[in-house]
Image (cartoon, rainbow, N blue to C red):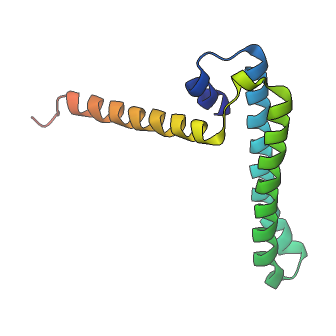
């Protein structure tokens, strides 16, 4: 997913950037899998009144830490001309999502209805 967004922002990716985006996608996937597995473990092994506080606090800290760590690694790994900020990535993602939705809608509208 990150590779696709980077491709939308920068065009064809260099091998270094493609490898980096694959690793970042795996890291985020691992983080979200951990965040999914954590609440049941907390629910089973800790008092229930702590579940809400711990899961919300831990989730927020994990995501913030991951964003910070990923930014530092990106700045050290990818040359300045080949990286962009979060705003450019979000803009490319929403632009692509909007085009994709419009293309799907146009293809639905262009197909003849079987009831006619």
Q: Quadrant of residue 56?
A: bottom right
Task: Identify the image quadrant of the N terminus.
Answer: top right
Q: Quadrant of residue 116?
A: top left
Residue positioned 82% across, 73% down in the render: 54
Residue positioned 90% across, 74% down in the render: 45
Residue positioned 74% across, 22% down in the render: 17
Q: Residue furthest bottom?
A: 49
* Lateral position of residue 116 relative to residue 30, left or right: left
Q: Position of residue 115 (x, y in %)?
A: 13, 37
* Lateral position of residue 98 relative to residue 50, left or right: left
Q: Residue furthest right?
A: 45
* Lateral position of residue 71 relative to residue 82, left or right: right
Instruction: Answer above or below: position of 104 versus 39.
Output: above
Q: Position of residue 8 (x, y in %)?
A: 56, 26
Residue positioned 87% across, 82% down in the render: 47
Q: Residue furthest front?
A: 80
Q: Quadrant of residue 23?
A: top right
| The one of 106 and 74 positioned closer to us in this rendering | 74
Instruction: Answer above or below: position of 46 versus 36.
Output: below
Question: Exactly how many numbered labels are in the figure?
Answer: 0
Q: Position of residue 16 (x, y in %)?
A: 79, 18
Instruction: Answer above or below: position of 35 versus 91.
Output: below
């Amino acid at each position: 997913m990150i590779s696709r967004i980077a491709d939308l922002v920068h065009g064809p990716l260099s091998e270094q950037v493609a490898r980096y985006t694959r690793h970042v996608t795996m890291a985020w996937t691992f983080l979200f899998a951990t965040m999914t597995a954590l609440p049941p473990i907390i629910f089973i092994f800790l008092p229930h009144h702590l579940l809400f506080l711990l899961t919300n606090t831990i989730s927020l800290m994990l995501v913030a830490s991951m964003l910070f760590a990923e930014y530092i690694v990106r700045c050290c790994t990818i040359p300045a001309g080949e990286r962009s900020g979060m705003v450019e990535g979000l803009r490319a993602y929403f632009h692509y999502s909007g085009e994709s939705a419009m293309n799907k809608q146009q293809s639905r509208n262009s197909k003849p209805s079987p009831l006619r």
